[in-house]
Amino acid sequence: NAGVTQTPKFQVLKTGQSMTLQCAQDMNHNSMYWYRQDPGMGLRLIYYSASEGTTDKGEVPNGYNVSRLNKREFSLRLESAAPSQTSVYFCASSEGGAGYNEQFFGPGTRLTVL
Amino acid sequence: QKEVEQNSGPLSVPEGAIASLNCTYSDRGSQSFFWYRQYSGKSPELIMFIYSNGDKEDGRFTAQLNKASQYVSLLIRDSQPSDSATYLCAVNRRSGYSTLTFGKGTMLLVSP
């Protein structure tokens, strides 16, 4: 079992460029999440998908879009990257809602926007 | 008022001591509380969760919950240098689907 995988591990973008962060889980979990983590800021929820076919905004959705491609995969897209989006991005999954189930996190993507 | 508050630390304790990590939350209706550990440069991993008032023990870890005071804590007994990490407190959000609000984390340093 690989758990939660994320690609790429590192990325440098210029302002205005676009990119997609990929996430996949092999635990047959229903729910998937995207967080960003900035120094001294803890984890902040960007978007989540409660189940295949649904997506919802979290605390900080502006500038991002997501796609729940199937039960395994949940991608995060930056259409026009800004320096404020420099962060570490974590994907996570859980069997059901995160409030009552353990979340399993991927290794993270370190994104720098110049 | 921030939803989930933690002292950023660092909290420094000697090896073998008890480390006490604290967290307060603002939503009185929150029902589930989690402690995640995050080593530097790594992803968070679950240590414990607690739903009911009182203490819950798991090995060297004890979670304590006091809903009246809106306070949750994590005690680590016999602290080891390998416990040095950032500890994230997380509380469920009542509105909408079940997601978590994380605190900023407390850095723990255990010296040999």
Image: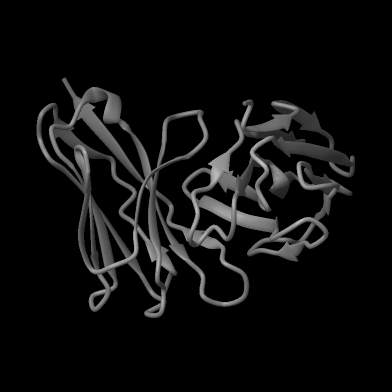
Residue at 18% x, 24% y: name it.
B111
For the C terminus of chain B, the image quarter is top left
Residue B41 sits above or below residue A50 on the image:
above
Left or right? Give the position of A4 relative to B86. right
**Outermost residue, left side:** B17
Image-based side of A27 in relation to A83, left or right: left
Residue in the picture at 89% in, 44% down: A16
- The image position of residue B68, as x and y in percent, is 24, 78
Against B10, residue B109 (above or below) is above
Q: How is the image coloured?
A: one colour
* Residue B11, image quadrant: top left
Q: Position of residue B86 (x, y in %)?
A: 37, 39
Using the image as rendered, state which of residue A62 and residue B96 is in the foreground: B96
Q: Is residue B47 left or right of residue B66?
A: right
Against B59, residue B89 (above or below) is below
Residue that protrudes farthest toward the front in the picture? A28
Along the viewing direction, whichever of B39 and B58 lies nearer the viewer: B58
Disc tally is 0
Q: Position of residue B28 (x, y in %)?
A: 37, 79
> In the figure, residue A38 lies in which quadrant?
top right
| Residue at horizontal 78 percent and vertical 37 percent from the top | A22
Q: Quadrant of the N terminus of chain B?
A: bottom left
